Amino acid sequence: MNKITIEFFHDVICSFCFPMSYRMRQLQKLMPEIEIVHRSYALVKSERDFDAMFGSRAAAKAEIMSHWEHANHNDDHHRFNISGMRQTDFLFPSSMKGLIACKAAYFVAGDAGYWDVFDALQNALFVQNQNIEENEIIEDCVRESGIDFESWVHHYNSIETKDAVESDFLLVKQYNIQGVPALVINGNQQISGAQPLSKIIQVIEEITKGKEQPTSDGASCRLVDGKIECE
């Protein structure tokens, strides 16, 4: 097989990224020769974005719960704790603290470290219904991943880590990515949305045969006219 590199764009608060990350884990087990590179995408970059998207941050959670319902249907194991999240009293988290936490883990332990912290944060939000903007929750997720914590703290507070997240955002524009999850294979072929594992494998196999594939779309969260749409 020719070398395959997949850039996996995702956001810690993206509901459809949760089932997609599970499928990408399965893909890596089936095709360990594939390199998976993790990239940041921010659906809600700042608290002010909630006002533009939902009218107010307080109003965001009710609409986002409908996104979770769609994503839970897409998820292979239907892991979302929607009723539990409705009972929580914290405001829905934005993207950046979680993304910086993941990128800091990358500087400690590479893409494997990024992925472990990303999955831990998503599980904390979608299953355990914890506020992944709270420093204590983020730190618990990092410790759960097993990477060197003191080294992670250094990188988490480093401007270079924030700059690296912003560099991923530039790639989002360069690739014209409209939503997440999104895969970019070998820098040109895109798979958009939480596609079935069989579809991902099919596209990869066709690419290894030298056949260019049309962009494939599936369920995703994307920004449309300044608002989040997840379907």
Image: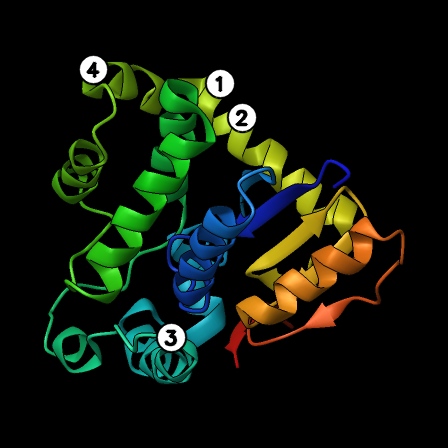
Residue 147 x/y as whole percent? 25, 24
Against 49, residue 65 (above or below) is below
Query: Dots 1 and 2: beta carbons under 8 Å?
Result: yes
Circle 3 Cα neighbour tier, 10 Å, few/some/many (<14 / 14–19 / ≥20): few
Which SS class for mark 4? Answer: helix
Q: Where residue 160 is drawn, which disc sits there?
A: 1
Q: Which residue is mark 3?
A: 76
Between the C-alphas of marks 3 and 2, the distance is: 34 Å
Residue 32 x/y as whole percent? 53, 40
Q: Which residue is mark 2?
A: 163
Location of the N terminus (image quadrant): top right
Which SS class for mark 1? Answer: helix
Q: Which residue is mark 4?
A: 150
In this rendered view, identify the residue nearer to me: 226 or 98: 98
Amino acid type, callout 1: Glu
Amino acid type, callout 3: Asp
N-terminal of the pair, mark 3 or mark 2, is: 3
N-terminal of the pair, mark 1 or mark 3, is: 3
Query: Dots 1 and 3: beta carbons under 8 Å?
Result: no
Q: Quadrant of residue 55?
A: bottom left
Against 64, residue 159 (above or below) is above
Instruction: Say which residue appears at 36% left-offset and 28% top-offset.
Output: 105
Amino acid type, callout 2: Asp
Amino acid type, callout 4: Glu
Q: Nearer the viewer, mark 1 or mark 3?
A: 3
**Residue 173 visible in this rendered orientation of the protein:** yes
Residue 5 x/y as whole percent? 67, 39
Residue 104 x/y as whole percent? 38, 26
Between the C-alphas of marks 4 and 2, the distance is: 20 Å
Query: Dots 3 and 2: beta carbons under 8 Å?
Result: no
Q: Quadrant of residue 117?
A: top left
